[in-house]
Image: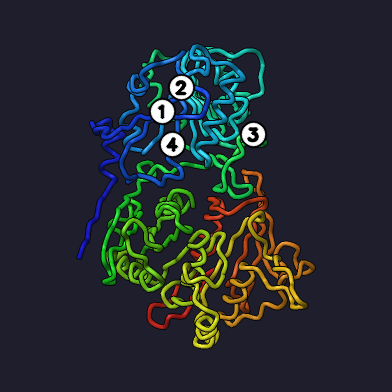
Amino acid sequence: MNNRILTLAAMFLAVFAGLQLSAQNLKTETVDGVGAKVWRITADRPSTYSDRTVNPVYFIYYNGAVSDPMSVIRNFGMERHIDSYLATVYVVNPANGKSYSPSADLEVFYKLEEQLRVINNLKLIGKGTGATFINNVLSLHAEAVSGILTIGGSVNGKLNPVVVPTYCAGRNKAVVDHYIRANHALESGGGVWKNPLHQMERIYVNGSPFSDAEFFMDAWDKIFSHNYRFNNYTTWYNGTDVRHTQPYELVSYVMFDRLHIRRNIVEQNLCGWGDFLWYEYIPEDLLNASKASIPLVVMLHGNTNDPRTQAETSGFVELASEKHFMAAELEWQGRDNYAAMGLDGIEAVIRHLLEKYPQADPSRVYVTGLSAGGMNTTSMCIFKTNLIAAGASMAGGLINDARFNTGTSSSIDEQIRRYNGNMEVAYLLCSGTNDGRFTDTTAAADGQPASKGWLVSAVETIAKLNGMEIGETCNPSLDPMFGMAVRDRRNISTMDDLTMHEGTLYKGDTPLIRMIALEPYGHWNYKGAAREMWEFMRHYSRDPQTKKLIYRP
C-alpha cells in the first residue's frame, strides 16, 4: 500500500522565518503578440502550496527599459517567493523601448490580461517611471487588479483611480492621497489607511529607506497576501472582458500559517483500486483535543477543478480555524494518476479520517461542495445518509449524470422507499441568481408540462427522502425568489453589495432544508455563504447507534 503523507506547515514557517529555500527551475520565456518586449518568469514544478486559481501573478513596470529580466527578479528578491507560491511574474518593457506611454502601454496591459484569460490574483509593481505609469494610467483601469506596489514615482493631478489595495513606498503625498481617495480610506495608525466599511480596501505607506526587496516582502506581508480578486457577477472562468465596467470582488487570501492550520497531503490506496488524494486541514489547537469532540467538514471541488479549490476559495478553512473544526478536501474525481473515489470512496476516506483522528466526532460529519462537488454533496445526502448529519451544496443541484455520482432515477426512488422518511438529513442549497434560480423551469415542448431545474429537483428529492410535504414548487406567487411556501424568510445585505435571500422548509418543528439565493452572483464559491452553511449544519448531529438525526436549536 502506498501511504505517503507530507506535512507542509514546517516548510511554510521556514519561508516566513527567512530560512534559505532554493528557487529551483525558474523558467524565463518571452511573451509574444502584446506589442512590447515582455518576459514571463515561472517556477517550473508542480504546485504543492495552493490552487493555481489564486496563485499570484505580477506585472512589473520598472524604471525604464530592461534587458535582463532576472536582474529585476533578483532586485526585488522574488526568487523564493516565485518558488514557494508558484507565482508568475511578467517584466514589462515600454512599448517604444524607452518610456511608458498612456495609450500604447495601456494596450499592452490589456493584451497581457487577455492572454491570462482568467484573472484572479493580479498584482502591479512599479518603480520610478514605472510607478508613475501605474499611478497615472493603470490605476484608472485596475478593476481586475488585486494589489499595487509603487516605489517612488509621481501622479499628475487629481485623477479617479479604481479601488485597489495599495502599498506606497516613498513620501510623495500626492501619490498617497491618490490611493487614499481610491479606497475611501481613513487613517487607522501605523502607516495604514482603511475603508471602515470594507476592510480590504486599504493602503499602507512606508517612507523608510528600504531596498526594493525589503519593500516587496513588506508589501507581501501588509497588502498582497491578504486578498485576491475576481469577477463572479456572471461566471468568472468563462474568461475576462478586459474593458471592465466595474471593480471585481476583493476576496480574502488563505494563509495557513496565520490561521495556525496544519495541512497534510495524503496519498493512500484505501479501497484497492488506486491511490486516493486528499488534503487535511487541522487547527493546531485541536491536534490533541479530547475524543469525539471535533466536527469534521468534508469539501468536494467542482468539475475538473484543482483538488485544493474548496480550501482556497470556499471560506471553510478560515471557519475551521475560527469555529474549531477539522476539514478535509478530497480529489473525488480522479486526476494526475489518482483514482476516482465515487461515493463509496468518499465514504472510505471519511471512515479512515474518523479512525485516524480520534478527536473527530462521528456524529457530526458534514459534507459541502461546489458545482459537481455540490451534486456529489446532494448524492451523499441521498445515498450515504446514515454517515453524515448535514450537507451544503454551492451551485450544485441534482441532475442525472454518472460523472457526478448522482445515481439514477430508479436508485434514488429505491432509497426514498428504503428510508420512508425515517432517516432524515439536513440540507442547504445555495445558488447565484445569475447561475440558476429556484423558480427556473425548462420550457415545455409538444404540449408537455415544463420540467423543473436542477435546484428544485434537488430540494424535492431531499424533501421526499425526509418524508416532508413541501407543497407546490416553481410558483413565484408563493415566493418570487424560491417559488415555494418557505419559512424564516430573510434578506441579508453583504459588504460585497450582494443580497443573500434565505428561506427554510420544515418537517414539523424541525428545519431540514434551507435555500439561499445570492443576488447578483454567478457559478462559484462565496465565502459569506460558507458561514451561513456552517451556522445551519452545526445544529445537526446523527446518533452513532440509532442513526437518527438530532437537531439542537
- Asked if disc 1 and disc 2 are in contact, CB closer than 8 Å, the reply is yes
**Alpha carbon of mark 3 to alpha carbon of mark 2: how far?**
22 Å
Task: Tell me which label, 3 or 2, sits earlier in the chain.
Answer: 2
Q: Is residue 403 visible?
A: yes
Task: Write down the residue under mark 4.
Answer: 56
Q: Quick one: 82 or 177, which is closer to the camera? A: 82
**Alpha carbon of mark 3 to alpha carbon of mark 4: how far?**
21 Å
Q: Nearer the viewer, mark 3 or mark 2?
A: 2
The amino acid sitting under disc 2 is Lys
Q: Which mark is residue 30?
A: 1
The amino acid sitting under disc 3 is Arg
Task: Tell me which label, 4 or 1, sits earlier in the chain.
Answer: 1
Q: Which mark is residue 243?
A: 3
Task: Tell me which label, 1 or 2, sits earlier in the chain.
Answer: 1
Give me the residue at 55% from left, 39% from top: 250
Q: Position of residue 358 (x, y in %)?
A: 29, 66
